[in-house]
Image (cartoon, helix red, strand yellow):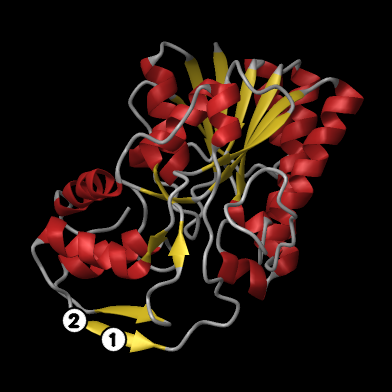
Amino acid sequence: MRIVVTGGAGFIGSHIVDALVAQGNEVVVVDSLWSNGGGRRENIPDGVSFVHMDVRDDGLQRIFAEYKPEVVSHHAAQHSVAIGSRDPKYDANVNVVGMLNVLEAAVKAGTRKVIFASSAATYGDVDRMPVDEDSPQRPESPYGITKMVTEHYLRFFKAEHGLDYTALRYGNVYGPRQDPNGEAGVIAIFLGKFLQRQGVRIDWDGEQTRDYVYVGDVVRANVAALTEGPGEIYAIGTGKPTSVNEIYRVMVDVTGFEAPITRAERRPGDAREVYFNPAKAKRDLGWEAEVALIDGMRKTYEYFKGKEHPTI
C-alpha cells in the first residue's frame, strides 16, 4: 500500500512510519521539521522517502500527484496549546488551512482514505466521565478548536468528494521520542527531570487525572484504521484515569530516584478528571490499549536513558 505520513518525523508519526514500513508498505514522509514541532530527520528510518515540506505549501499537490497515495496519515500539526493560545491565527493556518491543502491534494490524487490525528482537547471541560465519541465538544483552546473544526471538514470531504476518513481522538500519548523539554506530556517532562536528578513541580494536589496511552498502542490503532472504521471517529485511550501523583510514584519505582517535589497552585482551566471509554474502538477496530503504565514508562525511561542528552 502507498501511504503518505505527514508529520512522519515527529513523535507519534515516526512510530507509525516504523510500523507501516515493517508491514511492507511504501511510505513517503512529509514533514517541515519545525523547531517547535518535534520533527527530527533521524526519526525517519533509512530507505523511506522524505520530503521536507510544510503541509501548507502548494508543492504538496505535486507530491501527491506524483506518488498517488492510497492512504494519507495526517499527523502534521501545530500541537502546542500554549503557542496556539498566543497566536490563534498561526494555529488555524497550520491546523485548518494546512489540513485543507492535504485534503484537496488527496482528492486530486485519487486517495482512498485519510487517517486523522485528532485530540481529547476537542472536548474541553466535560460534565460526565468517561468521555466517549458522543460526549459534547466544547474546546477551550485554539488547538482544540482547530482539531474539532477539522473533523467537520473530514465529513464534508467524504460527503462531497467520497474521500473516506477515520479520526482518532488521542488521550495523553507518551513514549520514546517525545520531547521532555518545553511543552510536552507530564511523563516526558518528569522523565527529563528525573534523568537530570532535578526536582519536579506538581500543580494542585496532584490528584487530577488523565488517560495516558502508550505510543505503541496508538500506532496499533492507526494500523487498524487503514482498513477499518470508515467515516468514523474513535476515542483512543486506556479507559483508566491516572493521577499525577501516581505517575510520580511509578516513576520513582522505575528510575530508583525520588525527585524533590515543588507544590504549586492549580493552573487556570485545569480539569479535575479526564479519561476515555474506548469501547467503540474495541468493537469496530478490534483495538484496545495493551501496555500497562509501568511497562510503557519503563520503555520510555530506557529510551531516554540511552540518549546522551534526554531530548527527542
Residue farthest left in this picture: 256
Disc 1 target residue: 262
Instruction: Confirm or deny contact between disc 2 and disc 1 (CB under 8 A).
Output: yes
Determine which quarter of the picture holds residue 162: top right
Residue 85 visible to the viewer? yes
| Classed neighbour count for the residue bearing mark 2: other residues with Cα under 10 Å, few (<14), some (14–19), many (≥20) | few
Determine which quarter of the picture holds residue 14: top left
Disc 2 target residue: 260
Q: Report x, y in % for residue 196.
A: 16, 70
Q: Report x, y in % for residue 112.
A: 71, 16
Q: In what element is the residue under mark 2?
A: loop
Q: Residue at x 74, y 62 (%)?
A: 138
> Seen in the image, is 136 located left or right of residue 293?
right
Q: Residue at x 67, y 15 (%)?
A: 68
Q: Amino acid at mark 2?
A: Pro
Q: Nearer the viewer, residue 35 or 152?
A: 152
Q: Residue at x 74, y 56 (%)?
A: 137
| Classed neighbour count for the residue bearing mark 1: other residues with Cα under 10 Å, few (<14), some (14–19), many (≥20) | few
Q: Report x, y in % for residue 89.
A: 75, 65
In the depicted structure, whether residue 75 falls above or below residue 45: below
Residue 225 visible to the viewer? no
